[in-house]
Amino acid sequence: MELKAIVMDIDGTLLNKEKIISTRTKNKLIEAQKKGIKIVLASGRPTQGMLPLARELEMDTYEGFLISYNGSQVYDVKTKEILFNQAISINLTNELLNHLTNFEVVCMVDQDEYMLVNDAFFDIKSEGPAGYMNIVHYEVRGGNFKVCEVDDFSKEIKKPVNKILVAGNPDYLQKHHQAMSAPFKKSITAAFSAPFYYEFTNQGIDKARALDEILLKLGISKEAIISFGDGQNDRSIIDYAGIGVAMGNAVPEILELADEVTASNCEDGIARFLDQYF
């Protein structure tokens, strides 16, 4: 195949366990861009939380793209333009957040420079990201937000929301996630991005839907794309691409779906797979 675009998730895929891009993987992706291959980062992260990684990969020089919030926004790193945005309405956001008060979880919603949360000290009672006080601390710092703890989200949400992030104990989320999303099946999309993260976006939103907003306009067919992922919310890009590649550390669902399996995110899985192409 003639490779024209590389699409990849961030956490568990591009980043290793230290939450950094290894030198080998970084050099390989910069080399790809020098050859005219487009780079797309596709993550559940907010756009502003992805920009430092995009700059590290020199995507602002070579015009890479960010698919953020699990696909509800597309951003051109070079031109700084939002190319696509499909958020959850304020009314639906408030209905969903009110429903989620029935569950033992922490909800996180960003509004401009702030991350609104219902409990800034929530403990997921499970192994979370190392080096952070709790899951809220990790998410707020990773997205470059200020934290704002609120008693009533409806008093603070002033504009449509790209994503509602729910964090909780993995066992609890597995037991209750269907009840959390059931009343909203016709109006929202819900997916796990990690065992402790369950995320809500607008109906019909996923990472592959967002890819259509970029690659079709560039004249790049699905057959010319390689996608890398590890989590359930990467299913759409693995299925979409000409070659969908699961990281060695991927969840069983993605390992089974993928066309190929590479080494883990801690073993330069992306770079090692791309070695056969350039």
Image: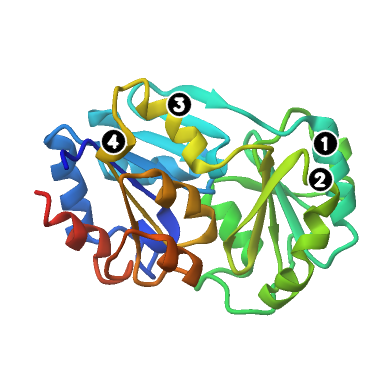
Residue type at mark 3: give it: Glu
**Which mark is in front, 4 or 3?**
3
Q: Is the residue 253 above or below the residue 180 in the image? A: below
Label 1: which secondary element: helix
Residue type at mark 1: give it: Leu
Give the class, few, some or many, for how many residues have Cα within 10 Å of label 3's Cα (few <14, many ≥20): some
Q: Which residue appears at 71% of the width and 71% of the height? A: 174
Q: CA distance from mark 3 to mark 2?
A: 25 Å
Residue that carries the numbered disc 3 in the rendered image: 213
Task: Name the foreground residue: 182 vs 104.
Answer: 182
Q: Which residue appears at 74% of the width and 66% of the height? A: 121
Figure quadrant of residue 32: top left
Q: On residue 92, which mark appears?
A: 1
Looking at marks 1 and 3 on the same chain, the residue that comes earlier in the sequence is marked by 1
Label 2: which secondary element: helix
Furthest toward the left, the residue is 278
Residue 254's x, y, as percent?
Answer: 45, 63
Residue that carries the numbered disc 2 in the rendered image: 184
Q: CA distance from mark 1 to mark 3?
A: 25 Å
Q: CA distance from mark 2 to mark 1?
A: 9 Å
Q: Are marks 2 and 1 in contact (CB under 8 Å)?
A: yes
Q: Are marks 1 and 3 in contact (CB under 8 Å)?
A: no
Looking at marks 3 and 2 on the same chain, the residue that comes earlier in the sequence is marked by 2
Q: In this rendering, does residue 48 appear at all?
A: no
Residue type at mark 2: give it: Phe
Looking at marks 4 and 3 on the same chain, the residue that comes earlier in the sequence is marked by 4
Looking at marks 4 and 2 on the same chain, the residue that comes earlier in the sequence is marked by 4
Q: CA distance from mark 4 to mark 3?
A: 18 Å
Q: On residue 59, which mark appears?
A: 4
Residue 78's x, y, as percent?
Answer: 32, 25
Label 4: which secondary element: helix
